[in-house]
Image: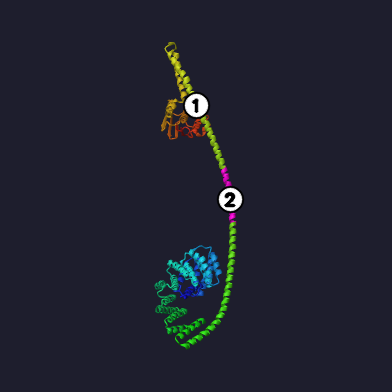
């Protein structure tokens, strides 16, 4: 059954070389489908590729006129499209396929390397497959395997085409089969079947390819004497034929089935399958297959000792005028042996002599052919040397090209690096200037804050000194002059009964009482005892009561003021309120004056409103008095805010926010 491999290999070659391939599908449906694409699409690129595909189909069918016509249409659509130009190079090689075109195929693969789509990967896989097939035909098995495994297989995987991957595995299997490594051949054939089965297509071409693999598997299993498994794959082929090709058949199926029956010595069934094969071969006018089946029947008859039937078969085959001298010599020798077995010595001698004559002629032709073969081998060797030399030059050129690319890349990287460094230095310089400018701003701000802090610290010291001095003066007035005035009043009371001093006493007593009240008022203004004894609210209330008169009504409201305010803050708040009230009474000419104080945790709010004459706030800097300046200084000491809202003849509203500390 080794001859089946030749059929498989020839089948591959027929498809690739554009030879006549006896397919179950005449490809008319595919051609019509492709023509429909041309008529419906507006894309010139798609039309161009479709024209190439149709041209290839007609080329395979030996319809060369149509093939050239569609090829010409495809070329006309290329224009300046670089992608189509690269693709066309591959299709043009395919349409003018020659066994020595490995260099062209390599160049086509190089042109397509820059494209990364699945469709291009499929084309590249096909190109590398054809290169491997060329090396296989030149009988370079190692080179064939190397191209298939290291190049075609990875690209086929990237294409995600199950069919392309299956074809690569199949050709690897064929190479190992021809090297008589049946185990590896079987392993790669199993991979090929697995990939094709997993594609789950539904085209006639797919089922033909699947049957071909199954029959090849039958061949392998038959050699391995695994007859039962061989019948399993034969039955798989039978099911596909019955389901998909019920009105047609495939010649190799009957050959494989008959060979299996012959292997198990079921000669009657073997002859039956061979007869079916002959009938199908006649229908397809395949004379070579007819003779092949007849020779298989001859083998069966010889095994059955049916010499007369064997003789008739062999004579019938020998009558074919298209037989080569070699085949006539072989068949004449077989007939001579057959007649000898039948004891028909005259005919045995006749065909023996005929064999000798043919053998002599064959030897002469063999010598001539041997010379021609040697010349062909020499020419092939020279061509191969040229190919190797060209490949070497190509690799050298590619190496130099890669070196040039690397040099340019390094140059570009160096240039980019230099630009980056310059840009970095420039940017760093700008950043340093910004940093220096910001540092200068920060320094000035810090200096201003420090200056302000120092001013506040000096102001605080001055105010504290002022308060201390006020306390001392108030204490001295109260304890010194106040005590003496009170003692004086008591002494005057003792002489009150003397009539002669009565008028003077009343005058002195009234004057003394007025002096004591004014002294107490001065003492209160300097440092109110109420503030120290009863707290801020009471002190402000006393202040409002003291300043209240018949002309101005002062209203005081407090909200949430607690006794935990630090005494220094209380004094500052009291002085602010005191200064505000005095200013309002002195300048506003108001009749109503309202003061509101409230506390929210560390925030203390003061609002004073009057219905007086008001003033222009913008002219506040022109005031020569120290009242507002003292208020602003005390507000600054407590990190507060000071806002005045006033319009001429519309009253004044003053709002103050203070940040206080707790005792």
Q: Quadrant of the C terminus?
A: top left
- Which stretch is magenta? 411-436
Residue 423, labelled with which disc?
Answer: 2
Q: Is residue 616 visible?
A: no
Asked if 216 appears above or below 538 in the picture, the reply is below
Type of secondary structure dominating the magenta stretch: helix
Is residue 249 found left or right of 446 in the rendered image?
left
Q: How is the image coloured?
A: rainbow
Q: Secondary structure at mark 1?
A: helix
Residue depicted at x 48% and y 85%: 336
How many angstroms separate mark 1 from mark 2 (CA)?
Answer: 65 Å
Residue 43 placed where, x, y %?
A: 49, 65
Q: Quadrant of the N terminus?
A: bottom left
Confirm whether the magenta stretch covers residue 651.
no
Which tag, 1 or 2, sits closer to the chain's start?
A: 2
Residue 270 placed where, x, y %?
A: 41, 78
Tell me whether circle 1 and circle 2 mark residues in contact (CB < 8 Å). Answer: no
- Nearest the viewer among 441 and 80 is 441
Confirm whether the magenta stretch covers residue 417.
yes
Which residue reaches farthest bottom? 346
Q: Is residue 487 visible?
A: yes
Residue 300 placed where, x, y %?
A: 43, 80
Residue 343, labelled with which disc?
Answer: none
Residue 443, picture quadrant: top right
Q: Residues within 10 Å of mark 1 (few under 14, many from 20)?
A: some
- Nearest the viewer among 450 and 255 is 255
Residue for badge 1: 468
Is residue 233 found left or right of 65 in the rendered image?
left
């Amino acid at each position: 059954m080794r001859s089946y491999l030749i059929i498989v290999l020839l089948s591959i070659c027929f498809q690739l070389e554009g030879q006549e391939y006896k397919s179950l599908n005449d490809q008319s449906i595919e051609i019509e489908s492709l023509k429909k694409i041309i008529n419906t699409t507006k894309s010139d690129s798609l039309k161009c590729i479709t024209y190439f595909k149709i041209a290839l189909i007609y080329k395979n069918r030996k319809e060369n006129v149509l093939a050239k016509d569609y090829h010409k249409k495809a070329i006309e659509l290329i224009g300046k499209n670089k992608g189509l130009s690269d693709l066309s190079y591959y299709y043009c090689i395919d349409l003018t396929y020659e066994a020595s075109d490995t260099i062209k195929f390599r160049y086509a693969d190089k042109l397509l390397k820059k494209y990364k789509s699945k469709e291009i990967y499929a084309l590249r896989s096909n190109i590398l497959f054809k290169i491997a097939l060329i090396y296989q035909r030149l009988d370079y098995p190692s080179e064939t395997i190397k191209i298939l495994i290291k190049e075609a297989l990875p690209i086929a995987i990237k294409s995600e085409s199950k069919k392309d991957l299956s074809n690569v595995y199949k050709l690897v299997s064929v190479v190992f089969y021809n090297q008589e490594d049946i185990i590896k051949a079987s392993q790669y054939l199993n991979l090929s079947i697995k990939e094709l089965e997993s594609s789950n297509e539904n085209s006639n071409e797919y089922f033909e390819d699947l049957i071909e693999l199954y029959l090849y598997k039958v061949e392998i299993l038959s050699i391995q004497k695994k007859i039962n498994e061989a019948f399993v794959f034969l039955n798989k082929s039978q099911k596909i034929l019955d389901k998909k090709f019920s009105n047609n058949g495939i010649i190799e199926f009957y050959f494989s089935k008959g060979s299996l029956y012959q292997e198990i010595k079921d000669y009657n069934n073997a002859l039956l399958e061979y007869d079916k094969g002959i009938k199908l071969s006649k229908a397809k006018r395949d004379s070579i297959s007819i003779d092949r089946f007849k020779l298989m029947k001859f083998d069966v008859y010889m095994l059955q000792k049916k010499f007369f039937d064997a003789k008739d078969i062999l004579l019938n085959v020998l009558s074919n005028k298209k037989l080569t001298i070699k085949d006539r010599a072989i068949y004449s020798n077989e007939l001579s042996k057959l007649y000898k077995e039948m004891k028909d010595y005259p005919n045995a001698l006749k065909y023996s002599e005929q064999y000798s004559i043919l053998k002599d002629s064959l030897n002469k032709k063999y010598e001539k052919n041997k010379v021609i073969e040697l010349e062909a081998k020499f020419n092939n060797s020279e061509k191969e040397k040229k190919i190797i030399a060209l490949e070497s030059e190509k690799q050298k050129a590619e190496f130099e090209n890669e070196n040039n690319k690397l040099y340019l890349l390094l140059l570009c990287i160096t240039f980019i690096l230099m630009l980056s460094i310059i840009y970095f230095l420039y940017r760093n310089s700008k950043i340093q200037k910004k940093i220096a400018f910001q540092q200068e701003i920060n320094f000035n701000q810090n200096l201003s804050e420090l200056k302000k802090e120092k001013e506040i610290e000096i102001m605080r010291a001055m105010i504290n000194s002022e308060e201390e001095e006020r306390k001392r003066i108030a204490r001295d007035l109260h304890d010194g002059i106040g005590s003496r005035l009170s003692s004086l009043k008591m002494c005057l009371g003792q002489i009150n009964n003397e009539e002669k001093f009565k008028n003077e006493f009343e005058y002195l007593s009234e004057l003394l009482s007025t002096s004591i009240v004014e002294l107490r008022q001065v003492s209160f203004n300097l440092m109110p005892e109420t503030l120290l004894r009863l707290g801020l609210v009471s002190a402000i209330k006393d202040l409002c009561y003291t300043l209240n008169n018949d002309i101005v009504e002062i209203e005081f409201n407090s909200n949430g003021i607690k006794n935990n305010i630090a005494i220094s803050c209380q004094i500052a708040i009291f002085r602010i309120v005191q200064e505000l009230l005095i200013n309002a009474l002195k300048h506003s000419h108001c009749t109503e004056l309202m003061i509101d104080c409230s506390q929210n945790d560390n925030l203390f709010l003061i609002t004073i409103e009057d219905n007086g004459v008001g003033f222009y706030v913008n002219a506040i800097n022109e005031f020569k008095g120290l009242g507002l300046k003292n208020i602003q200084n005390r507000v600054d000491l407590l990190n507060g805010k000071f806002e005045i809202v006033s319009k001429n003849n519309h009253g004044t509203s003053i709002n103050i926010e203070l940040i206080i500390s707790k005792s």
